[in-house]
Image (spheres, rainbow, N blue to C red):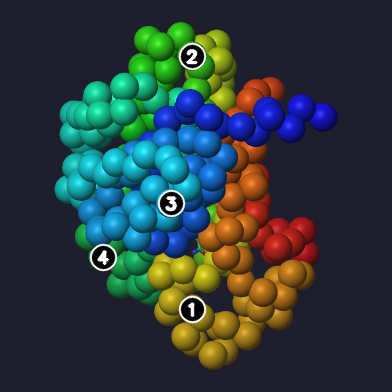
Amino acid sequence: MHINMFDLTGKVAIITGCDTGLGQGMAVGLAEAGADVLGIGYADASETQMMIESTGRRFEYINANLIANASKYALTELIDQAAAIMGRVDILINNAGIIRREDLLDFSEENWDDVIAINQKAVVFLSQAVSKYFIKQKSGGKIINIASMLSFQGGVRVISYTASKSAVMGITRALATELSQYNIQVNAIAPGYMATYNTQALRQDVERNKAILDRIPAARWGLPIDMVGPTVFLASAASNYVTGYTLAVDGGWLAR
Ligand code: NAD
């Protein structure tokens, strides 16, 4: 077993939304595996910065709202800026995402457009832009998209989230198909029910919390640390013949 296949020393990773939650966990995990990290997001990422710098790796941050910047032009500019700051790029993690809960019959256009903009459109055009760098560098590259259980299931009161996360699984396959010829692997991770800001409302609802926990074979909410092993695997040479796949990190939720 070539354990150093998981080593990311000398690699540069771009990750969206790494100030908190799963993004923070993955960003720190990539740094612990050896990568320098550039975050893109709209919130204060100083905690992540401290955690990454304490591993001895470099952390840079571009402040940008991915809903307001969800045009091909603006998303391409963000990748151009990131590559200029870091000098190269090897890994993109499309993590930033939002959920809006509203009954289907009242679901607003704003709650549709905002979610689709960041969860779906940004994924496509950030991936397109970064792929051009991978090709220019002749290095190949890795793209990891963050999907969801609602890439597989319908969900309740979250139509735009389900639409966008179902699209992420298809986008992952489509990107993988076209980008394989450039040695770019594109995969997704579908987290199960993870204890982050995203699921705060669910966890505070005593009935929903119990129903969810009762259905998870692992009998606990997932944590950002649970994302690290799969992320490092999909970001490293260890997964060079894995592409187009969506890996569930769900404590057995889908298996049940
Ligand atoms: P979170 O709410 O803690 O984090 C979301 C991240 O996205 C934050 O870093 C936030 O700053 C960033 N973000 C939100 N809106 C933004 C905007 N307009 N511009 C730029 N950045 C923005 O949630 P999380 O659980 O860590 O979510 C991370 C990803 O994992 C999301 O794509 C989410 O859909 C997905 N996911 C989460 C769960 C879960 O149970 N928590 C399950 C499946 C998938």
Q: Nearer the viewer, mark 2 or mark 1?
A: 2
Q: Quadrant of ligand 1?
A: bottom left
Q: Nearer the viewer, mark 4 or mark 2?
A: 2
- Label 4, on which residue? 108
Amino acid carrying label 4: it is Ser
Q: Nearer the viewer, residue 227 or 11?
A: 11
Q: Is residue 80 above or below residue 154?
A: above
Q: CA distance from mark 2 to mark 3?
A: 28 Å
Of pointers 4 and 2, the one earlier in the residue sequence: 4
Q: CA distance from mark 2 to mark 1?
A: 42 Å
Q: How packed is label 4: few (under 14 Cα within 10 Å), some, or many (20 or more)?
A: few
In contact (CB < 8 Å): disc 2 and disc 3: no
Residue lying at 66% horizontally and 78% vertically, measured from the top left = 213
Q: Nearer the viewer, mark 2 or mark 3?
A: 3
Amino acid carrying label 2: it is Ser
Residue lying at 50% horizontally and 23% vertically, measured from the top left = 141
Q: Nearer the viewer, residue 182 or 173?
A: 182
Q: Secondary structure at mark 4?
A: loop
- Label 2, on which residue? 139
Q: Give the numbered dot on residue 202.
A: 1
Q: Give the numbered dot on residue 65.
A: none
